[in-house]
């Protein structure tokens, strides 16, 4: 039963716009999915009514090691006893920057903010200041900055809304959206606009991420040819594909990159990093934030990065992600279910041929104690037994759906 959770959630609607400050977290399946989560441990979460779920939402990606991990929580608590934020930098700010420079290929210098979109905005401002150019090309999901431009390849959640509402035409005319892995479209745009393109901002596509092997180096060469900058959005791919994200996995160097989510196992932090001359420019052009050096998130990031390097976390994410992906796809194939889980194991995406079956599938999984998102995020706390249990529950869901037809 989920009655109390839904009662509390509906009460919150009187005061909390939309019921959540994060649009993708708003529950849509009334009395079926958990509207409110009160606890997480390892790879499982519990709702207000006490229902337990094997969780593959993981806060939409940030929880990469697991919920309530003692080695990380202890570092946050220790820092809490010493203070959250000060009027001067804390030593931990430089310590975490050093760890990132040591582990991320393109990082020469680092600065911290709180969210991915905020950090991408910083990189865009730096790119315009450095190049003297104005136009920006977006690819993939760059947070709600995607609201600045329409175009092919725009994330569905943005394109189905009213993205340009509230954006002056003078601003939107400086932004373009291009599709992932269609290099001909990129070449055509650069031939037309390349002399005024300051930078491209690229987030890898979940379901076709393998195409990055050819596509991303091609974009890198295109930006060099036109004296534009390349900014990699590694908010999701960072610490999942590799610690250094897609640019490390596919072996090329962008000018700047943005990291967040998995970097601190759920604490709010982002980092924009890259060539020294670019990141050092931030102060000169007025990029600053009171909470950039907030110490609890930095303590979590420091502990998380060390946990990654000491426990081969990324390798585990690949192993468990592939085990889950292959197992679910085998079930879909065996029952002739119109869906496929596509992409790389650490962050594959459900691709449905039938939207009605999509809703029924997610609802059935909630009933059977599995919490999915359209992108599937495993964390380090998912072990083989958790994946096996998940596959049993997914198969039970598919059987129920077949019986109901």
Image (cartoon, helix red, strand yellow):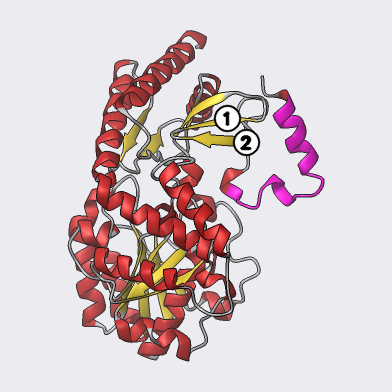
Circle 2 sits in a helix, a strand or a loop, which is it? strand
Q: CA distance from mark 1 to mark 2?
A: 6 Å
> Which residue is identified by label 2?
38
Front in this rendered view, residue 293 or 45: 293
Residue 251 occupies quadrant = bottom left
Q: Determine crowd level at label 1: few under 14, some 14-19, many 20+ residues with C-alpha closer than 10 A.
A: some
The residue drawn where x is 72% and y is 31% is 6
In the rendered image, the vertical position of residue 229 relative to residue 324, given as above or below? below
Residue 221: give x, y in percent of width and height.
19, 74
> Which residue is identified by label 1?
46
Question: Left or right of 211: which side holds 46?
Answer: right
Residue 381 on the magenta segment: no
Overall secondary structure of the magenta stretch? helix
Write the start and end of the magenta stretch as one range.
4-23
Circle 1 sits in a helix, a strand or a loop, which is it? strand
Residue 216: give x, y in percent of width and height.
24, 63
In the rendered image, the vertical position of residue 358 relative to residue 405, given as above or below? below
Mark 1 or mark 2: which comes first in sequence? 2
């Amino acid at each position: 039963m989920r009655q109390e959770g839904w009662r509390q959630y509906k009460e919150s609607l009187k005061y909390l716009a939309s019921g959540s400050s994060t649009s993708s977290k708003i529950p849509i399946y009334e009395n079926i999915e958990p509207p409110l989560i009160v606890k997480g441990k390892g790879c499982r979460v519990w709702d207000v009514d006490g229902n337990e779920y094997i969780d593959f939402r993981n806060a939409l990606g940030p929880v990469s090691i697991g919920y309530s991990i003692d080695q990380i929580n202890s570092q946050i608590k220790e820092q809490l006893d010493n203070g959250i934020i000060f009027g001067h930098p804390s030593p931990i700010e430089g310590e975490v920057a050093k760890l990132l420079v040591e582990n991320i290929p393109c990082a020469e210098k680092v600065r911290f903010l709180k969210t991915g979109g905020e950090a991408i905005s910083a990189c865009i401002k730096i790119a315009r200041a450095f190049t003297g150019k104005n136009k920006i090309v977006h690819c993939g999901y760059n947070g709600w900055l995607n609201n600045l431009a329409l175009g092919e390849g725009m994330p569905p959640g943005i394109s189905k809304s009213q993205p340009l509402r509230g954006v002056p035409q003078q601003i939107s005319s400086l932004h373009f959206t291009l599709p992932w892995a269609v290099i001909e479209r990129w070449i055509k745009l650069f031939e037309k606009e390349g002399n005024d393109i300051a930078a491209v901002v690229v987030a890898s596509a979940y379901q076709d991420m393998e195409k990055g092997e050819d596509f991303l180096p091609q974009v890198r060469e295109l930006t060099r040819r036109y004296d534009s900058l390349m900014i990699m959005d590694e908010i999701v791919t960072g610490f999942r594909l590799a610690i250094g994200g897609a640019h490390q996995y596919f072996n090329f160097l962008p000018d700047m990159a943005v990291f967040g989510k998995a970097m601190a196992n759920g604490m709010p932090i982002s980092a924009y990093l890259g060539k020294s001359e670019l990141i050092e420019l931030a102060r000169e052009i007025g990029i600053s934030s009171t909470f950039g050096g907030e110490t609890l998130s930095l303590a979590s990031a420091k502990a998380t990065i060390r946990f990654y390097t000491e426990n081969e976390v990324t390798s585990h994410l690949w192993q468990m992600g592939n085990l889950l992906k292959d197992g679910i796809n085998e079930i879909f194939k065996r029952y002739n279910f119109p869906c496929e889980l596509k992409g790389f194991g650490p962050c594959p995406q459900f691709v449905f041929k039938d939207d009605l079956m999509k809703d029924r599938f997610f609802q059935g999984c909630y009933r059977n104690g599995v919490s999915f998102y359209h992108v599937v995020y495993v964390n380090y706390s998912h072990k083989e037994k958790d994946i096996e249990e998940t596959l049993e529950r997914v198969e039970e869901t598919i059987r129920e759906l077949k019986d109901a037809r």
